[in-house]
Image (cartoon, rainbow, N blue to C red):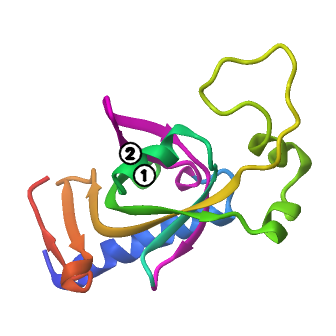
């Protein structure tokens, strides 16, 4: 396996992630995010909103009162999983997350139905009989990646591990 092929694997990963922000039907649009809760790992599917390869950052929108924000405040370590069936590509990434206050202009551009997701009862709490009118709790969740593990289920399987500590220079590892 050549270095050129290895670098092309990383390129393919970033292409799929970027496509997830532009194509509503692309599987990278809905990655699974894992945080560490007091009870252990906690998983959820989010919508990928922005990818910045230069800073290795993935951006999601969230309710600032959701349980994941408390998890991240306690332990910013995260993991992300994406499965691209057509390419037979599994992307696993690790990094750290931080919450950034939502941008009012960005919030105003969201459809009304999407804006409603950031008001009302706090996620994960029992539904009240009357829905309180609360100020929006819109926030941006920025995940800075430090490791990408890409597994291609070709014949034979290929797996590359890339880390920011090595300027994203990868290495082939056993699938």
Q: Position of residue 139 (x, y in %)?
A: 66, 58
Q: Which residue is drawn at 47% across and 63% down?
A: 98
Q: In the figure, is residue 129 to the left or right of 66?
A: right
Counting from the top left corner in percent of width and height, residue 30 is at: 56, 48
Give the percent coordinates (x, y) of residue 144.
41, 69
The residue sitting at the top extreme is 129
* Residue at mark 1: 72
Regarding residue 81, the answer to whether it shows in the image is no
Mark yes or no: residue 56 visible.
yes
Callouts 2 and 1 close, C-beta under 8 Å: yes
State the CA–CA distance, disc 2 to disc 1: 7 Å
Give yes or no for residue 39 being in the magenta stretch: yes
For the N terminus, give its image quadrant. bottom left
Closer to the chain start, of discs 2 and 1, is 2
Residue 28: x, y in percent? 53, 55
| Element at label 2 | strand
In the rendered structure, which segment of residues is drawn in magenta? Answer: 27-54
Nearest the viewer among 122 and 45 is 122
Residue drawn at point x = 70 percent, y = 63 percent: 102
- The furthest residue to the left: 174
- Circle on res. 35: 2
- In the picture, measured across the screen, residue 76 lies left or right of residue 66, that is left
The quadrant holding residue 60 is bottom right
Q: Is residue 168 above or below residue 120?
A: below
User: Residue at (47%, 72%) from the top-left corner?
Assistant: 57
Q: Nearer the viewer, residue 161 or 145?
A: 145
Magenta highlight: main SS: strand
């Amino acid at each position: 396996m050549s270095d050129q092929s290895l670098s092309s694997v990383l390129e393919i990963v970033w292409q799929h992630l970027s496509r997830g922000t532009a194509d509503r039907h692309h599987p990278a649009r809905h990655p699974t995010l894992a945080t560490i809760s007091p009870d252990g790992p906690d998983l959820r599917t989010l919508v990928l909103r922005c990818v910045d390869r230069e800073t290795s950052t993935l951006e999601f929108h969230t309710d600032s009162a959701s349980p994941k924000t408390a998890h991240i405040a306690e332990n910013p370590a995260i993991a992300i999983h994406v499965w691209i069936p057509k390419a037979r590509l599994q992307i696993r990434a690790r990094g750290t997350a931080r919450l950034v206050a939502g941008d009012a202009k960005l919030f105003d551009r969201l459809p009304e139905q999407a804006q409603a997701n950031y008001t009302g009862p706090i996620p994960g709490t029992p539904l009240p009989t009357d829905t309180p009118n609360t100020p929006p709790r819109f926030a941006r969740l920025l995940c800075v990646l430090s490791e990408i593990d890409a597994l291609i289920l070709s014949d034979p399987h290929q797996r590359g591990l890339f880390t920011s500590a090595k300027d994203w220079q990868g290495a082939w590892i056993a699938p």
